């Protein structure tokens, strides 16, 4: 009797796995027809019956298991108030940022930082300037700021060229601080990571500046005062 029950359970489990694989194949085939040039298509389950999560390159969408319906938006688990979509995106961001070269960042760090964040910044952005005006406050809160370039007007714009000049300066930190006051740095050219960082920002979902990214891949869009940011970063560790 027990053996029969175990065999039945095993058979049901196998059928479930086969069904899930079939669903994944149907969804992947449908997505491939919609986005034929996608480099990455990864299908996985969600807690919602009949709904699958689909990673398309660095984007997250959802599809019905039969491949008929595509949904865009976030899945929120209400009991824990967990944004499951953002969790999935954080994993993608972490992977993209894994091999980031710190030597290509302009950093303002306290002696013994409690938190390290990446800040995608535009030199002409008002709130980016406000953030940098309080750089000592962030450092006093134990927050290390590592700047990456994100000229919102795009590659080849005046803001782009200005960041290149900052990067090529003998003292990058001084040049960046000068530019954040609204003064133009001395025009300079040299090998630089500005275009690379701009494209990286686009891949991880940066649409405005400043955009703050934690070590866990959490994206915090917009300016936040030093004490408030410290509280937010502390809460993310709990």
Image: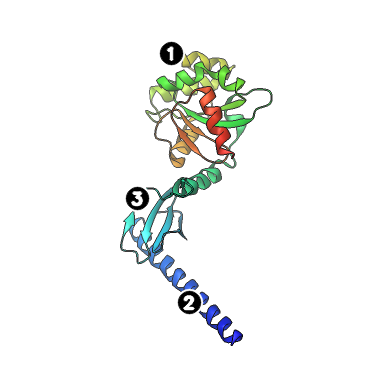
Precedes in sequence: disc 2 or disc 3: 2
As helix, strand or loop, the secondary structure at mark 2 comes to helix
Query: CB of mark 2 within 8 Å of CB of mark 3?
Result: no
Q: Is the residue marked by circle 1 packed among few (<14), some (14-19), or many (20+) residues within 10 Å?
A: few
Mark yes or no: residue 114 visible. yes
Q: Is the residue marked by circle 2 packed among few (<14), some (14-19), or many (20+) residues within 10 Å?
A: few
Q: Residue at x 54, y 21 (%)?
A: 168
Closer to the camera in the image, 45 or 48: 48
Residue linked to disc 3: 72
As helix, strand or loop, the secondary structure at mark 3 comes to loop
Q: Work out whether 220 lies above or below 127.
A: below
- Specify the quadrant that holds the N terminus: bottom right
* Position of residue 95 measured from the top left corner of the image (x, y, whole percent): 55, 46
Q: Residue at x 53, y 23 (%)?
A: 226
Q: Work out whether 67 lies above or below 88.
A: below
Dividing the picture into quadrants, the one containing residue 37 is bottom left
Image position of 4 (left or right of 42)? right
Residue linked to disc 1: 182
Q: Work out whether 141 lies above or below 31.
A: above
Q: Is the residue marked by circle 3 packed among few (<14), some (14-19), or many (20+) residues within 10 Å?
A: few
Q: Give the mark toward the camera: 2 or 1.
A: 2
Q: Give the mark toward the camera: 3 or 1.
A: 3
* Position of residue 72 measured from the top left corner of the image (x, y, whole percent): 35, 50
Q: Residue at x 55, y 19 (%)?
A: 135
Q: CA distance from mark 2 to mark 3?
A: 29 Å
* Position of residue 92 measured from the top left corner of the image (x, y, whole percent): 51, 47
Image position of 65 (left or right of 228)? left
Mark yes or no: residue 186 visible. no
Q: CA distance from mark 3 to mark 1?
A: 39 Å
Closer to the camera in the image, 70 or 238: 238
């Amino acid at each position: 009797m027990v053996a029969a029950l175990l065999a039945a359970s095993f058979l049901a489990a196998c059928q479930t796995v086969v069904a899930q694989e079939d669903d994944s194949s149907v969804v992947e085939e449908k997505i491939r027809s919609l986005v034929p040039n996608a480099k990455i298509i990864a299908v996985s389950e969600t807690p919602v019956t009949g709904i699958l999560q689909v990673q398309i390159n660095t984007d997250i969408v959802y599809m019905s298991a039969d491949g008929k319906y595509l949904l865009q938006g976030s899945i929120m688990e209400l009991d824990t108030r967990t944004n499951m979509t953002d969790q999935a995106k954080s994993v993608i961001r972490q992977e993209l940022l894994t091999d980031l070269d710190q030597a290509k960042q302009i950093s303002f760090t306290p002696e013994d930082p409690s938190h390290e964040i990446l800040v995608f910044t535009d030199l002409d952005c008002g709130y980016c300037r406000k953030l940098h005006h309080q750089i000592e406050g962030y450092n006093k809160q134990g927050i290390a700021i590592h700047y990456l370039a994100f000229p919102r007007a795009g590659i080849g714009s005046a803001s782009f060229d200005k960041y290149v000049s900052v990067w090529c300066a003998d003292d990058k930190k001084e040049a960046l601080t000068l530019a954040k006051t609204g003064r133009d740095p001395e025009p300079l050219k040299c090998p630089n990571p500005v275009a690379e960082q701009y494209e990286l920002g686009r891949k991880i979902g940066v649409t405005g500046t400043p955009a703050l990214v934690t070590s866990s891949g959490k994206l915090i869009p917009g300016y936040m005062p030093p004490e408030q940011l410290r509280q937010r970063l502390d809460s993310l560790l709990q």
